[in-house]
Each structure stands twice: as structure tokens, then as C-alpha cells.
Amino acid sequence: MELKNKKWTHDEFYATREEVLTHWPTGKEVDFAEAVKYHENIPAKRHFAKRLVKAKKNGETLTQPRAGVALIDEHINLLNFLKTEGEADLLPSTIDSYTRQNQYKEAQNGIEESLKAGRSLLNGFPAVNHGVAGVRRVVESVDAPLQVRHGTPDARLLGEITIAAGYTSYEGGGISYNIPYAKSVSLEKTIYDWQYCDRMIGIYAEHGIEINREPFGPLTGTLVPPSVSHAVAIIEGILAAEQGVKNITLGYGQCGNLIQDIAAIRALEQLAEEYMNKHGYNGCVLTTVFHQWMGGFPQDEAKAFGVISWGAATAALAKATKVIVKTPHEALGIPTKEANAQGLRTTKQMINMLKDQAFPLTSELELEINIIKAETRCILDKVYELGGNDYAVGAVRAFEAGVLDVPFAPSKFSLNKILPARDNNGAVRLFDVGNLPFTPDLVAFHQDKMAERARAEGRSASFQMVIDDIYAISKGNLVGRPR
Ligand SMILES: CCC[C@H]1O[C@@H](n2cnc3c(N)ncnc32)[C@H](O)[C@@H]1O
């Protein structure tokens, strides 16, 4: 396996596909020609890419939950409940953890145990075991655009089955579904395997079927600086475009300071266009997704609704194309369908009240946009250089060197040298920039911001601030002030 950011030939793809479809018996159900025909008859209102394009044109911010249960009928009921009671614009199927680790035997046990227990004993929808026929029952029974959401380092068979069944969007990427989700899975392997997923979608595109791809923006969801998640998002967008993907949603996890979060979405839109065009992928339609706070949540449901509302308001003011919605059960575990629908309605109310308001381009907002763009450029350009003008090779080498570094990542391939903490206004800064290739003025900017907070709190900038900030929101605040 020689990794390079180059479009796979049909021969390379089909040779690999033969093997991929043997990973579980349901792989035999995948019939590409039949799938293309099926997709041709999916109406625009149930087509993810078309619905996103319409939202971008109309300046809408669409709502989407996470949701998934073990059995097909219950999963259908859940999704329809979230559409009718939650007013969700877009629907997911969140895949269970066994399937994410390619443990299909265990997933099968989970299905059988759930049947016996009469309730879901899996933390998501085991799509590979249900197979094309089973997953297609969901597609036929839910009148909304459907996306596969998961966290799968080797997502090749999952993608073949769910897209053949009629799903029209696929989340993930070779970096964003490795570094935050795996401990010792090689980055080279996951970037290579995700080239397969993207090439598959590129081949659907060659047959006129446009499937949306969404790299997983938030990464570890714990104080990830915008420039770090933007660099990964844009690299995964470029890798997908190289394989023929034409419709890409780039994502970002809310940090909590309004100016920084709005700036992050603006900077992401501008930089993605700039880099995709620079590398010749101007045929790609780009949209954005804002994830409501991905860190620890308050147990108290009323406070949880406050966090959800803040994420909804920020997504609306940032004019993100869609927002991924949290629930008041976030601190407890898998939400009930009622709690999930409540998070969606709270979000919808905030978006509706803000859709006629625009956030002004203040000097603070402009500064923040410029800082995020400058930092992200430093990282992207260094990755490209390390890879000898190849982002796939560059990404692997960048993680080895700490040029790409994701805070609190379980993967042993992330150096975990950078240390984020909030500044005195709650924006996420870097207490330690690690080996990020920032120019001296950018390093100084972060140092000054941390010094400003240290002075205000009467304590020196320290790792304690990082710890305080990790728990702050679940304890009812944004900045982890000393007790
Ligand atoms: C990025 C993944 C973390 C988020 O994903 C939610 N999540 C995971 N699995 C399910 C599920 N089966 N149904 C509804 N939400 C789910 C968690 O709560 C958390 O917010």
C-alpha cells in the first residue's frame, strides 16, 4: 500500500471492493448498478446534497440530531419521531460502537439480545448486519434526507451497504475518524481506507449520483483550537475531492466564545474555498456544519438547555449551513427520543428568532477571522511541504512532527504536545503551542492572551487552567475560574 493523494483508478478500486464485500455476508447484497438506479429515483427533498445546496442558497441553518437504535422498526419510529416532534430538517443514523470497530459478530449478538429484551442494547444502528435490504427499509420509511454518522476507522463495508441502500450522505475521514477514535490504528491505513470510501462516492458521482461527504469537524471535542480542526477538515476535504467527491460539508465544534465561533465558521468557509480552488477542485460545492458544544455537559436539564441554546444561537449568527443538535440527556448517555426532540425544538426556536438578524463584522470579529486564517495557513502549508506537495503523505508526517496535533486525542499517533486553555473572554487559546508551525507573532498572541487571564485571576498561566476549563461548562460556567 503506497499512500499518495492521487485519484484511484477503477481497477485499483474494484480490486479492493471485491475483498471489502467479503468482510460480512451482507456485503453480497451490494449491487452497484441497482443502487445507482435506486438513487436516481430519490426525490430532491430526501437528497442530502440537494437539501444543503438549497439551504446555502436561502441562507438557512438546518437542524440535525444524532440518533440510532439496534432494531429496524424502532429505528424508523425514532427517526420519524425526530422529524415530526423534533422538526428535524436532516436525519442521521448513528452507528453502534461494535460496527465502528468492524466487530460484526458482536453487533449480531446485540441485535439478538435487543430482540429478546424488547429494547435497544446497542448504542447505535448496526447497519452492516441489517444489510442493504434492512437499511433500505429505513430509507423507504423515513421522508427526510438521511446521513450515516459514526466513528469508524475502516468504514469501507459500512459505506458500501448504507449508500447502496439509499443514504445520501456519509460522515468521517481518515484523520478525523482515527485520531479521536482509535488508539493505535495507523494513520496511513485509515487515510488509505478513506480514499476507498471517497473513491466509491466519486464513482457514484460519475454515474450522476451526488453523495454528500462530511469530515468529522470537532475531533476530540475538548478545547480544540479552530486552526487545528480547520486544518484537518480542509485536508480531508481535499483528499475527498481528489477521489471525485463533489459535495462536501466541513465542520467545526463550538468552543463557546461567540466572536471566536462566528469567526471560525467564516474563516472555514473562506479558507476551504481558497484551498480547494488553489488545488484545482473548483467543482466542489462546500457547506458548513456547526456542532453544538461537544465537551462535558451539566447534568441539570435546564442548564443543559442553556448550553444547547447557546450553540443554536451561535450557529444561527455564524450562518452555518447546518447545526448538529445536543440533548438535555447529554450528561447521562443515549437520550430518549423525547429528550432528543426537545433539543431539536429548542434549537429550532433559537434559529427562527435569529434568522432575520445579522452579526456585524466588528473589528474584534475581523481580527479573530484573520488570526484563525493565518494559523490554519501556517499548518496547511507546512503539511503540504512535509508531504512533498502531497497532503496525504504530509498529514502522516505532520502528526509525527507535531505539526498536526489534536488535544486530548487517544491516538498514540498524535503527540499531544499542544495544550489549549481559555483566555479571559473564554476564547480557546494555546497555553502551549507544542510543535505547531505558527509564526512568532501568532505564538506571542497566544502568550499575551494567556498572560491577560493570569493577571485577571491573580495566578500564573498553568496546566491547572486547562483542567479548570475542561470541567467549566459541566459546572455551569465557560471559563474555569479558580475557586
Ligand atoms: C460525536 C459523538 C458524540 C455525541 O453523539 C451522541 N450519540 C452517540 N450515540 C448516540 C445515539 N445512539 N443516539 C443519540 N445520540 C448519540 C452522544 O450523546 C454525543 O453527544
Image (cartoon, helix red, strand yellow):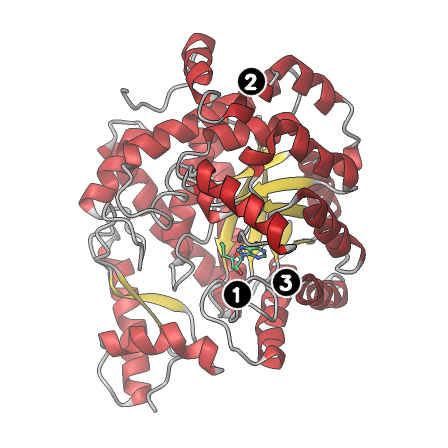
CA distance separating discs 3 and 2: 36 Å
Q: Are marks 3 and 1 in contact (CB under 8 Å)?
A: no
Left or right placement of residue 92 versus residue 423 in this view: right
Q: Amino acid at mark 3?
A: Leu
Mark 2 element type: helix
* Residue denoted by label 2: 203
* Residue denoted by label 3: 317
Mark 1 element type: loop
Q: Earlier in the sequence, mark 1 or mark 2?
A: 2
Mark 2 CB in 8 Å range of ligand 1?
Answer: no
Q: Amino acid at mark 2?
A: Ile
Residue 198, given in percent of the width and then of the height, sits at: 49, 27
Neighbour class for label 1 at 10 Å: few (<14), some, many (≥20)?
Answer: few
Mark 1 CB in 8 Å range of ligand 1?
Answer: yes
Position of 390 relative to 361 (above/below)? above
Instruction: Give the camera-side residue of 107 and 368.
Output: 107
Question: Measuring 63% from the left and 48% from the top, which residue is drawn there?
Answer: 115
Q: Are marks 1 and 2 in contact (CB under 8 Å)?
A: no
CA distance separating discs 3 and 1: 29 Å
Residue 333 marker:
1
| Number of marks drawn | 3
Position of 70 relative to 422 (above/below)? above
Instruction: Give the camera-side residue of 477 and 341.
Output: 341
CA distance separating discs 1 and 2: 38 Å
Residue 122, given in percent of the width and then of the height, sits at: 53, 51
Position of 189 relative to 316 (above/below)? above
Residue 417, given in percent of the width and then of the height, sits at: 21, 57
Residue 201, given in percent of the width and then of the height, sits at: 55, 25
Q: Earlier in the sequence, mark 3 or mark 2?
A: 2
> Where's the C terminus, which quadrant?
bottom left
